[in-house]
Image (spheres, rainbow, N blue to C red):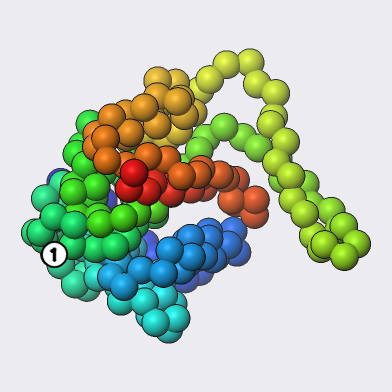
């Protein structure tokens, strides 16, 4: 596989919206809750997760095929040169959809191989949800996601970056989950949810049985 974008793609003004910042918060929150000693991030992008996570005491190793992103390990996501069960948590955020679907399954299988206890990923979910926020006294701001009525599931067309997205035709959520869970019977789904501030991003946390 070849890299899709140049380093300039991640320039702050072009890439880092407020909604994306909210997703980074969830990345940190999910991984920090697991209290891992060693974390592997597959596809670090601009390196934000590693930079912030290290300030909270996490030991992060990154792997990517793009040398100009300065990953710790230059390698394909489908062939990570580390031993089995090397990392407590393996994570990958908004990356697998950049691979053809069958290749993304190979990458997830490789993540399961090197993970000791958990896998945390996020993927784009194309089913439109409308976020509505309101204030609850003594609780704070709450956000609910309302499903937009639609006539049919949309087809997905490769846009130069995404080969597929959840809830596009042929890639329904149940189909994606069944494929991921069939790759390694040692893991099960602990939870999945959409980011309230950025519903396009859906998180999955898998744990060792």
For this rendering, which residue is in front, 198 or 9?
A: 198
Residue name at image x 37 percent, y 48 percent: 207
- The one nearer the camera, 160 or 18, is 18
Q: Residue at x 36, y 73 (%)?
A: 50
Residue at (39, 46) in percent of width and height = 206
Q: Residue at image x 82%, y 62%?
A: 139
Residue 153: image location, x then y, percent: 53, 20
Q: Is residue 171 left or right of residue 200?
A: left
Instruction: Reply above or below: 103 against 9.
Output: above
Count of marks, rendered view? 1
Q: Position of residue 129 (x, y in %)?
A: 65, 37
Image x and y of residue 166, in percent: 45, 33
Check disc 1: other Cα within 10 Å, few if <14, some if 14-19, many if 20+.
some
Question: Furthest residue to the front?
Answer: 209
Q: Residue tagged by mark 1?
A: 74
Give the vertical position of 119 relative to 8 (above or below): above
For residue 127, side relative to residue 98 (left or right): right
Does any portion of residue 8 appear in the rendered image? no
């Amino acid at each position: 596989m070849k890299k899709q974008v140049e380093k300039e793609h991640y320039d702050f003004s072009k890439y880092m919206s407020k909604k994306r910042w909210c997703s980074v918060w969830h990345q940190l929150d999910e991984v920090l809750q697991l209290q891992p000693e060693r974390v592997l991030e597959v596809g670090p992008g601009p390196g934000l997760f590693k930079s912030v996570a290290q300030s909270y005491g996490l030991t992060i190793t990154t792997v990517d095929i793009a040398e100009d992103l300065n990953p710790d390990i230059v390698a394909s996501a489908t062939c990570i040169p580390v031993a089995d069960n090397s990392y407590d948590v393996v994570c990958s955020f908004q990356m697998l959809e950049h691979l053809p679907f069958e290749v993304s399954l190979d990458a997830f299988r490789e993540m399961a191989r090197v993970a000791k206890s958990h896998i945390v990923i996020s993927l784009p979910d194309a089913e439109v949800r409308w976020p509505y926020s309101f204030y609850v006294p003594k609780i704070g701001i709450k956000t609910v996601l309302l499903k937009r009525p639609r006539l049919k599931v949309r087809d997905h067309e490769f846009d130069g970056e995404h080969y597929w997205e959840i809830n596009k035709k042929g890639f329904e959520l149940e189909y994606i989950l069944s494929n991921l869970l069939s790759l390694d019977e040692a893991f099960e789904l602990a939870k999945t949810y959409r980011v309230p501030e950025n519903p396009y991003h859906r998180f999955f946390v898998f744990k060792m049985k």
